[in-house]
Image (cartoon, rainbow, N blue to C red):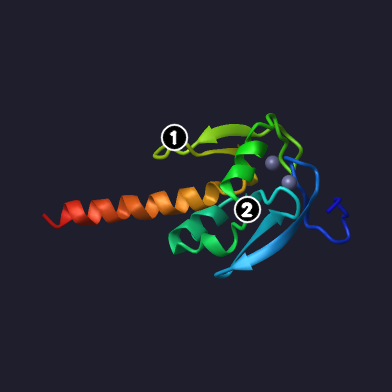
Amino acid sequence: MEYNPDVHSLKCPKCGHGMEEVSYGGVTIDRCTHCQGLWFDTGEADQLKDKWMGDALDSGSSSDGKKWDKVEDIACPRCGKDMEKTSDSLQKHIWYETCSEHGMFMDAGEFTDYKHETLADRFRSLVKGGR
Ligand SMILES: [Zn+2]
Ligand SMILES: [Zn+2]
């Protein structure tokens, strides 16, 4: 859907279409109506990750996300500054864009990876801890 400030909360930094607010587990994030990318204000991603509830929000497929991942140099939808491409320190295959002041943008599918890996890592550490 084309970005319309009356309807959408943010303009997608990746594809330029409108983003809409979706809330889950008491956390509100923004999801693109076109590429399904996700915007998290500072702190929101951590809250969701901890609750392991991202599935309901991340409706995009990983293959679509890979396609949009090739779009480089996106600007923060809040302040318009160039965002920094960052990889998760524990999960190097997951890349996302961050604005140090406002939050982070993830392509469709990446958040699901993020959450599942975290869950698996915790499980492994539990197993290890039991011995
Ligand atoms: Zn988009
Ligand atoms: Zn910003």
Residue 69 % position (x, y): 63, 36
Q: Is residue 85 left or right of residue 120?
A: right
Residue at disc 2, CB closer than 8 Å to ligand 1: no
Q: CA distance from mark 1 to mark 2?
A: 21 Å
Q: Is residue 5 above or below residue 14?
A: below
Residue 25 % position (x, y): 55, 70
Asked if residue 53 can be seen in this view, the reply is yes
Residue 51 % position (x, y): 45, 64
**Residue at (20, 55) in percent of width and height:** 127
Amino acid type at circle 1 is Lys
Q: How many residues crowd around disc 1 within 10 Å: few (fewer than 14), some, or many (20 or more)?
A: few
Residue bearing the label numbered 2: 60
**Residue at (76, 41) in percent of width and height:** 15
**Residue at (61, 48) in percent of width and height:** 108
Amino acid type at circle 2 is Gly
Q: Is residue 65 above or below residue 18?
A: above
Q: Of the numbered discs in the image, which one, if any, rests on residue 92? A: 1
Q: What is the quadrant of residue 99 in the picture? A: top right
Residue 114 % position (x, y): 47, 48
Q: How many residues crowd around disc 2 within 10 Å: few (fewer than 14), some, or many (20 or more)?
A: many
**Residue at (54, 46) in percent of width and height:** 110
First in residue order: circle 1 vs circle 2: 2
Q: Is residue 113 left or right of residue 56?
A: left
Q: Residue furthest left?
A: 131
- Quarter of the image that includes the C terminus: bottom left
